[in-house]
Image (cartoon, rainbow, N blue to C red):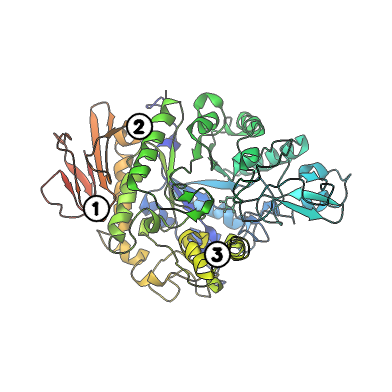
Amino acid sequence: MIDKKNAEWWKSTVIYQIYPRSFKDSNGDGIGDLRGIIEKADYLAELGVGMVWLCPVYASPNDDNGYDVSDYYQINPEFGTMEDMEELSAELAKRGIKIMMDLVFNHTSDRHKWFIESRSSRDNPYRDFYIWKDPRADGSAPNNWRGYFNEPAWEYDETTGQYYLRLYTKSMPDLNWECRELREEVYKIIEWWADKGVAGFRMDTINTIGKDQRFPDAPEDAPDYVKGRPFFTNQPTMHDVLREMNERIFTPRSIVTVGECSASDIEETLLMVAEDRHELSMNHMFEHDELDFGPGGAWDIVPFTAAQLFDVIERWQTELPAGGGWNSWFWGNHDLPRPVSRFGNDGKYRERSAKLLAAIEFTILATPFVYQGEELGMTNAGFDSMEHYRDVDAFNYYKYAINEAGLSEEEALANLRYRSRDNARTPMQWDASEQAGFTDGTPWIEVNKNKDEINAEAQLADENSVFNFYKKAIALRAGTPALLFGDFVRIESGCEHAMVYERRFEDERVLVAVNMSDEPASLDKSIDFCGLEPVLDNALGPGNDLYRLEPWQAVIYK
Ligand code: NOJ
């Protein structure tokens, strides 16, 4: 079991995710940068976060906004210089904030020198750094796998007459983790960043680095979306690599790690994060995120209920700790819709439901990850035509939807308005000025039209804003051992769309009641509020009936 009293620092911190391109532009080129983040260091300190996860800032041609790395030892000039990076880390350190870097090692850019070498000839020393296979007898791809962005997973390369594997775009070839030399090169890179004082790593799509070496076809009737996924997810090679990294780099330097491991259930997650496995500190689990996936995957969008969400929360909250693992929690990130538009109500109850999401996030047993703008209750961009989109995934989906899946243009656009990653990539809304205070130039992606109503300047000045609710909830969690370490115990709420749970540690007891609905909720009269006082309430001026929750009300009692 987890030793609560001697728990590692990262269990009681809050991690704030920055998508540098969209956070703050300091030089007017329309692209956020490192000096922009430095300008906002006080803002981060005010919110109360202890670590910043920076999405990739390495050299990159930006086919996938930095997730296609061409040199891991360089900063992308659009973002600044290595000196800026050092200054950022010093400025954050002054405020007690550590840095978590994004490690992208399932693939590189095709402009990385390893790939340039690898593709040049079959006997190049770097050939084995990537996954090359002969065509089938009829010249077609080695198998029927498909990637994450609605395309086949193999790309034919004329220079040597073989296919290479690429689970994302054709400019992002997958690395071959069976190759010892590749592993050693990657470990050097990680050590180099650790030597610079980086305290944590988020490991991009780490559970796809191992591939079933038989490279079998997926069943023909498997859906197109990531076809063949079981053959390149959670394979033994991943565990082997993680143990090696952990032993050599993470444990000796007390580095915190979080894996991005979609399609992993609790059992599979425990194999990565149970303390005695010595692999990762935490995993980003996606079960709540996948509640709206139909049988056809992410773009087969289906409705889900609050009750389903509560069950997911309860299962992870109880079963992961029981197996010796520590949870992380996020509502959104740069790949997902804005949480208030998806789990909340971004119309009439926008503020209240944004606060409710915070109330849950900071009162469950987990390290919380907040994605930029969530603390303002920012909403989906809701672009209504393709000209506004910037993401390769959006373009690929649009093509696939129209040409292969037979959807109408309107249907494809409706799916994009809900699901597209660009929804959460619009610039941070700092104030109500023309470009929301993000840039003096033309932003790389349009600012959300609601910046007058939703922006940081207004919210910092308003005691009852979403920002100030986040700030209070973060402070409450930090000062309440029961919230940090107490077991999570769900209590029968008496209402399908309300969840009630308790957290206890020694003599301290905290009770949380949330209503995820536009309708009020009547709570079960057996709930014991005895000796408890409300310490945070998002509905301001609650009635005096403890057993009734207003729409989207969340109350924390202590
Ligand atoms: C997950 C990242 O979060 C996403 O943005 C990226 O496109 C893929 N991995 C590929 O690196």
Find residue 392 and report its image quarter.
Answer: bottom right
Find residue 121 and report its horizontal and vertical position in percent.
Answer: 88, 49
Q: Earlier in the sequence, mark 1 or mark 2?
A: 2
Q: Give the CA separation, mark 1 to mark 2.
A: 24 Å
Question: How many other residues sit within 10 Å of disc 3, few (<14), some (14-19) or many (≥20)?
Answer: some
Find residue 239 and report its horizontal and vertical position in percent.
Answer: 62, 31
- Element carrying mark 2: helix
- Element carrying mark 1: loop
Which amino acid, by three-letter code, is at mark 3?
A: Leu
Q: Nearer the viewer, residue 376 or 63?
A: 63
Question: How many other residues sit within 10 Å of disc 2, few (<14), some (14-19) or many (≥20)?
Answer: many
User: Which residue in the structure is indicated by mark 3?
Assistant: 407
Q: Is residue 7 above or below residue 186?
A: above
The answer to whether residue 189 is visible is yes
Which amino acid, by three-letter code, is at mark 2?
A: Phe
User: Which residue in the structure is indicated by mark 2?
Assistant: 485
Q: Which mark is residue 538?
A: 1
